[in-house]
Image (cartoon, helix red, strand yellow):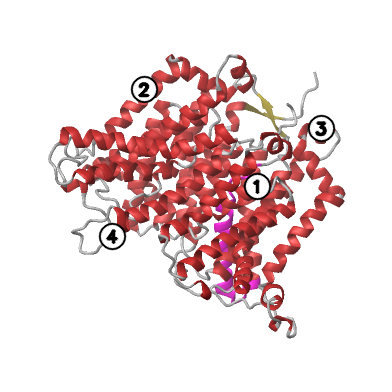
Amino acid sequence: MIRLEKRPTPSQVWSWATPLVAVLATMVAGGVLFAFLGKNPVEVIRTIFWDPILGEFAFYYRGQLLVKAGPLILIAIGLSLGFRAGIWNIGAEGQYIMGAIFGAAVGLAFYPMEARWLIFPLMIIAGAFGGFIWAMIPGILRTRFNTNEILVSLLLVYVAEQILAWAALSALRNPEGAGFPGSRNLKQYASAANEELIVGWGMHWGVVAAFIAVIFAYILLSRHILGLNIRLAGEAPRAARFAGVNPERLVLLCLGISGGLAGLAGLFEVAGPAGQISIDFNVGYGFTAIIVAFLGRLHPIGILLAGLLMALTYIGGEAAQATLGLPAAAIQAFQGMLLFFLLAFDVLTNYRVRFGREVKA
Amino acid sequence: MDFGSINPVLLIASLMVASTPILLAAMGELMVEKSGVLNLGVEGMMIVGAISGFIVAVETGSPALGFVAAAAGATVMALLFAVLTQVFLSNQVATGLGLTLFGLGVSSLMGQGYVGIRPPASPRMEFFGLSDLPVVGPIVFNQHPMVYVSLALVAGVWWYFRSTRSGLILRAVGESHEAAHALGYSVLGTRFAAIAFGGACAGLGGAFLSLVIVPQWTEGMTAGRGWIALAIVVFASWRAWRVLLGAYLFGGVTVLQLNLQAAGIAIPVELLSMSPYLITILVLVIISSDKRRAAASAPASLGRPFHASS
């Protein structure tokens, strides 16, 4: 007879060990999945997790790692603050899109003026503002009308996608684009381009912002009263109320920060790796970042590592697609599986597994 | 602009069709939430149902088998959720999200090679000439069988909650799992059954989309309908008949905006396309702004984990 016994306090060891166990379990289960698809599981796992870092063509993939990890970490850091406080912003994808549109619109408005010192900072502000505004909608609806922020933030993703279509097809369309949808390429506009800072490393301003966000979040959560309030509100809502934490302010703050960071990620993506506003420039980082946040235990350092790992699955997945013909969707399923295993193994953090009959005291 | 091309009778008939996937999914989720579980993975279960049903219908040539497979496929997903949240006591919000992300991935994996194929046609019901009656005919007597199934489901669930012992137990589990457990009812068993039922309904909804409405398979074809179904349960204050009202309201908006697009009205297409989502948000705001009522109608144990030792 196997039973679960609640631990008096969550286990520190398991809290850090579960992500590792979950990754290993996902590799095994993923291997089975890949075998079902008629691929050699060992070869696929090696292509995804080993070759991009240490393989023959690693020099090419290494640059991609930071490009993919940057937005994931930036968004996940913002989400983790809310998740800790029990505030569920799951519409980061929409905030990411709106940040990209706002930022790109500002950049394109100045075209072809040459003044990088002015335009690029303005774009960054506009990008963060776009994401912030989009996250404020569920925030204000929640605080003013008690509307569920999970549903509103998610539904707004579909609204944002329509706005993106309108921007790409009419509002921000390149007037010299020969009728093709999509905006001017910001990478070719020196004042607005989010260029690589160290050639070959994939290090752009978005990655810098992600590192800064990690540091700030770490200080916030471990040293600042606001971080304490966030943790308190999530772990003991009643105690938080007695301690004078204003729940409405916390909702707006958490949603605002996560929206702003997601907007920033969108702006850096559209001005850099993506280059232009197009109808499908977003690739679901806003949703994958949810997995990153949980995989990183909602802890800034954990998120940094989880973001790099998740970026690796993207890159390795693309490599496996090219060399082994693995379907693109397999990686998405693989990432979802990872979240499942993580949530399942998490039971070990809060409960002890006991074998044998219950001993009556 | 030509509003004359919009026929009110056909509008109502097609409204019922457009609402059915959401109605089915929302009725399933109503059952799940009444038992005190919040499953945010409706979207993921729906899309897995859509592709499972599509594959089986194409391979066997039988839409009916397709619907059975859709219910089965989505139930497997739902049981995954049930094991994680009820046995491993994982966070329900996170697990539901995971279910959606996983479902989207798995469905497009399953759907490789089924893009661009037409499924076998699933005919509408004919009632010996009654279908040719003016006005009533197309609306009442000439629908797809699943439309009748969905309506029967509403009546059945309403009756189940109102008049059966098992329905009463399910509600008790949802209101206070500790009390239900103390009385000797199986909290886990009830919730597993409710979650599985919710999965089957979501799967049917998904298959109705891929086999009847579209009918085709495209990745991510549920396009947020699972989330709208979740919103409709809140809108309905957890009551079966109001779920029907909410689903048909949403279906009405969807069909109307498609008709307006076709009629070439001078509103940007994107604005029309986003209108169902905006109206869902608006309705949610209106319904939840009355704080006392919203709090009173939600099952009291909704989303709280249950472990017999605590």
Asked if the stretch drawn in magenta spans residue B56, the answer is yes
Point out the frontmost of discs 4 and 2: 4
The kind of residue tagged 2 is Phe
Task: Identify the residue under disc 4.
Answer: A181
Q: Are marks 2 and 1 in contact (CB under 8 Å)?
A: no
Chain of the residue that carries numbered disc 1 in the rendered image: B
Mark 1 secondary-structure assignment: helix
The quarter of the picture where the N terminus of chain B appears is bottom left
Which residue corresponds to the image point at 68% horizontal and 38% vertical from the top-left? B294
Quadrant position of residue B133: bottom right
Q: Are marks 3 and 1 on the same chain?
A: yes
Task: Identify the residue under disc 2.
Answer: A216
Q: Residues within 10 Å of mark 3 (few under 14, many from 20)?
A: few
Whichever of labels 3 and 1 marks the residue nearer the N terminus, that label is 3
The kind of residue tagged 1 is Phe
Q: Is residue B217 visible?
A: no
Mark 2 secondary-structure assignment: helix
* Looking at the image, residue B214 lies above or below residue A239: below
Which residue corresponds to the image point at 39% horizontal and 47% vertical from the top-left? A45
Q: Position of residue A3 (x, y in %)?
A: 70, 32
Task: Identify the residue under disc 3.
Answer: B179
* Looking at the image, residue A4 lies above or below residue B241: above
